[in-house]
Amino acid sequence: MNLDIFSSWTYAQAQTQEDAVLERARERGRELGVESVGAATANFLSVLAAISGARNMVEIGTGVGVSGTSLLRGAGKHSALTTIDIDVDHLAAARAAFHDAGVDGSRTRAISGRAQAVLPRLTDGAYDLVFIDADKTHLMEYVNQGIRLVKVGGLVIVHDAFDQHRVPKPAVRQPSTVATRNATRVLREDERFVSSLVPTGLGLQLAARIG
């Protein structure tokens, strides 16, 4: 990587300051062994939620509430988040983060279960934003469900779009890397979407539905 580009990337990543709410959430994550989205990514999620005007959002992979809190903060007090995770401890940690952030309980729906079983029960085209940060084994299924769930004008966002920075290395063919490449290609080639791969944190694949 060009040193000037690397310096700029490092500088940009270091600009975000987090408050006590997200710091406590990250501490819970460390106790549970959960790696949350980075600070710059969390901040970017808030911006995306704000500029998209998102009101109804779905999060696949709750973590400990860092990303969910960031989305809710950006989207504003009239927004709602459905977040799905198989681990009840993760959901409990996320609920604590939402409470710490002053989010009214009526704005969040935390569902315990496998996303591949929960997502088909959600309504077609009813959501403004779908954020995917879950196991790569089922990533293609999550992306296809996101395409189904998001309305025209909405966003599908895939976190870790570089698969821990392995995607740019053509020789790497790990299952998670192949799954990530396939999922981002589906979004990029779908004529109903315009998409962009953003190099913040571990990478975000953004896809906005236009048709």
Image (cartoon, rainbow, N blue to C red):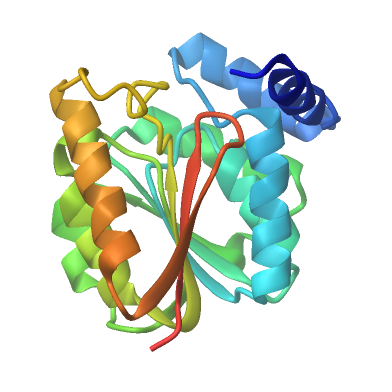
Q: Residue at x 34, y 21 (%)?
A: 166
Q: Please tell me which residue lies in front, 141 or 122.
A: 141
- Looking at the image, residue 145 sits to the left or right of residue 41; the answer is left
- Residue 203 in picture, x, y percent from top left: 50, 37
Q: Please tell me which residue lies in front, 132 or 24.
A: 132
Q: Residue at x 57, y 69 (%)?
A: 80
- Looking at the image, residue 105 sits to the left or right of residue 4; the answer is left
- Residue 5 in picture, x, y percent from top left: 71, 25
Please tell me in which quadrant of the rendered image residue 150 appears.
Answer: bottom left
- Looking at the image, residue 21 sits to the left or right of residue 171; the answer is right
Q: Residue at x 25, y 41 (%)?
A: 181
- Residue 190 in picture, x, y percent from top left: 27, 71
The answer, for residue 206, to whether it is visible in the render is yes
Indicate the quadrant containing the N terminus: top left, top right, bottom left or bottom right: top right
Against 74, residue 16 (above or below) is above
The answer, for residue 115, to whether it is visible in the render is no
- Residue 154 in picture, x, y percent from top left: 49, 76
Q: Residue at x 70, y 34 (%)?
A: 40
Indicate the quadrant containing the C terminus: top left, top right, bottom left or bottom right: bottom left
- Looking at the image, residue 107 sits to the left or right of residue 157; the answer is right
What number of labels is visible? 0
